[in-house]
Image (cartoon, coloured by chain):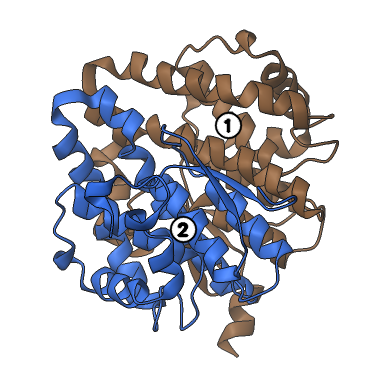
Chain colours: A blue, B brown
């Protein structure tokens, strides 16, 4: 463990951990991983991502303009507060037998709201043509949607953005299929 | 020309007196001394006014609050609060130092992502009969995590001695906790902070008991 390198306590498949891995990759920040076999829920990763953005050089993860910055946060919060917490491991364990329908319901509901918002804000990426925290939140949420068998084809803007983002190095190198703790059968 | 007229117009808050997320935005406006108009959205009446097509056009998530400000419409209370902070003068709602700023966001996110979404109206309607235990469970779980964090970060307020977005999130969540009969006394730091904050004008004037849409029987 390098002195002073950030240490990420994460889980290969946690969408919240993946968001932070993407941010580190976009900024070119080297970090060490201490995999933890429990999934961290909640959206506190957005605080980490903004901290990284504010203290490391490299491409901005939030735009300079206050209005578009607010749009990035709005989209990020819609995902991190409005969707992910309702389908994280802890909650679906409490829901029990109906967890598939429950998760699909909340992901669909969130994507139904997100699709028209993104139609307005998106250029090449979620907000205009620069990668931002919104994109960092979107891709892991689409991955979750696919795990819960949500038909993402119903959301053409989300689908298009996700495909474009998955072409990017930072989103690939941080992918759940390529982490130190990825099980062999799920490894890329 | 249109842009400057939009900036001169007062912001409009579409909210509900008792919505904790709406209350957060009201506190932020009050702390900054920003005048705004309210267009109440009754979450119960007519099957829930947030479910109308008109409201959906403002906020596709069909939740409150939505804020029309400077010619744009924003939803998600923390995005709104930070926009207000970044564009209006007055006391900072987030500290200048990146580390304490991150702590403010972490506490705010713990509440806004980790607690409130699990006990909002939509979700508890889906849970049905067990909604009381469900809500208490998630509030207790969140407060159990928050209490030791606040023990570390708090001075007079949640993070050090300046009021921040963390305080803005805390007070409405304690109000919700009390509505769900959670014993906040189990969390002494949360309790102390909430009491100190409720002494502050901005937290009083924005209180659910004092809004244009507060029903008479709940009015202060």
Residue ID at (50%, 33%): B214
For mark 2, give the secondary structure: helix
- In x, y percent, where is residue A99? 19, 33
Residue B74 lies, with reference to residue A128, above or below; the image says above
Report whether B59 appears left or right of B94. Answer: left
* Residue A24 image-quadrant placement: bottom right
Residue B61 lies, with reference to residue B8, above or below; the image says above
Residue A153 is marked as: none
Report whether A18 appears left or right of B38. Answer: left
Screen quadrant of the C terminus of chain A = bottom left
Q: Which residue is disc 1 drawn over?
A: B172
Q: Which residue is disc 2 drawn over?
A: A76
Q: Chain of mark 1?
A: B
Q: Do we see residue A61 in this rendering?
A: no
Residue ID at (30%, 33%): B123
Q: In terms of depth relative to the viewer, which is nearer, B33 or A89?
A: A89
Instruction: Say if mark 1 contacts mark 2, CB within 8 Å.
Output: no
Label 2 crowding class (10 Å Cα cut-off): few <14, some 14-19, many 20+? many
């Amino acid at each position: 463990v390098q002195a002073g390198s950030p240490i990420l306590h994460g889980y290969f498949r946690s969408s919240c951990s993946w968001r932070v891995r993407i941010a580190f990759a976009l900024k070119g920040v080297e970090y060490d991983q201490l995999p933890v076999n429990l999934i961290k829920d909640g959206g506190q990763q957005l605080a980490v991502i903004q901290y990284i953005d504010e203290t490391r050089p490299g491409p901005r993860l939030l735009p300079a303009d206050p209005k578009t910055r607010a749009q990035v946060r709005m989209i990020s919060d819609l995902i991190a507060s409005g969707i992910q917490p309702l389908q994280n491991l802890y909650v679906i364990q409490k829901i029990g037998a109906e967890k598939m329908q429950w998760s699909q319901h909340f992901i669909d509901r969130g994507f139904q709201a997100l699709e028209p918002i993104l139609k307005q804000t998106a250029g090449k990426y979620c907000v205009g043509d620069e990668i931002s925290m919104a994109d960092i939140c979107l891709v892991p949420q689409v991955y979750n949607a696919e795990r819960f068998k949500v038909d993402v084809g119903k959301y053409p803007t989300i689908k298009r953005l996700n495909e474009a983002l998955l072409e990017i190095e930072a989103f690939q190198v941080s992918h759940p299929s390529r982490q130190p703790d990825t099980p062999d059968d799920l490894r890329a």
